[in-house]
Amino acid sequence: MEREWQNLHFEDYKIVEDYNTALYGIVTRMRLYGRNLEDKDLIHKTLSTFHPKYTFVSRQYKKDNYKTYVTLSNALQQDHGEDEIIQQNHLSRPTGSMAPPEAHATSF
């Protein structure tokens, strides 16, 4: 279990829910064996295992000073959802592309 804990990295998961499932599975097993992890341990583990190119994001979450893992997890899920919407909007009309013409527009 210690090895699982050491090898758990937020960057290895595409969605927050999958990371949370793995995290809570490990935490539950560790608690069964007498190792109690606190919210601060879960928060530190999560924020310290972001992909290196997202260190600025990790720093921002650290500055927000979350006290419980649940509040951090909720923020991560909300931000992930917003990021997906932005990504979908970008894919539907990439930066620099022309807007489609209006249905009833006339050209000059």
Image (cartoon, rainbow, N blue to C red):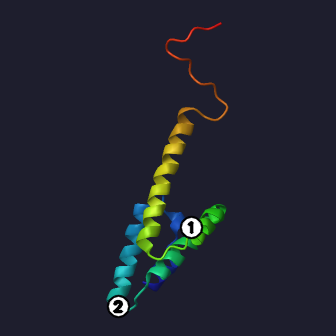
Q: Position of residue 61 (x, y in %)?
A: 56, 67
User: How far is the residue under mark 1 from the one under mark 2?
Assistant: 31 Å
Q: Is residue 49 at least partly visible in the picture?
A: no
Residue at image position (66%, 61%) is 53
The kind of residue on which mark 1 rests is Tyr
Q: Which mark is residue 2?
A: none
The correct choice, above or below, for 59 with respect to 44 in the image is above
Q: Nearer the viewer, mark 1 or mark 2?
A: 1
The correct choice, above or below, for 40 with respect to 87 in the image is below
Looking at the image, is mark 1 or mark 2 earlier in the sequence? 2
Q: Position of residue 70 (x, y in %)?
A: 41, 70
Q: Position of residue 80 (x, y in %)?
A: 49, 55
Q: Position of residue 100 (x, y in %)?
A: 56, 21
Query: Image quarter for residue 74?
Result: bottom left
Q: From the viewer's side, name the closer residue of 3 and 92.
A: 92
The kind of residue on which mark 2 rests is Tyr
Mark 1 nearby-residue class (10 Å; few <14, some 14–19, many ≥20): some
Residue at image position (46%, 51%) is 81
Q: Which residue is mark 2?
A: 33
Q: Tell me the quadrant of the picture where the C terminus can be found.
A: top right
Under circle 1, the secondary element is helix
The correct choice, above or below, for 13 with respect to 108 in the image is below
Q: Which residue is mark 1?
A: 61
Mark 2 nearby-residue class (10 Å; few <14, some 14–19, many ≥20): few
Residue at image position (43%, 84%) is 38
Q: Is residue 21 at least partly visible in the picture?
A: yes
Confirm or deny contact between disc 1 and disc 2 (CB under 8 A): no
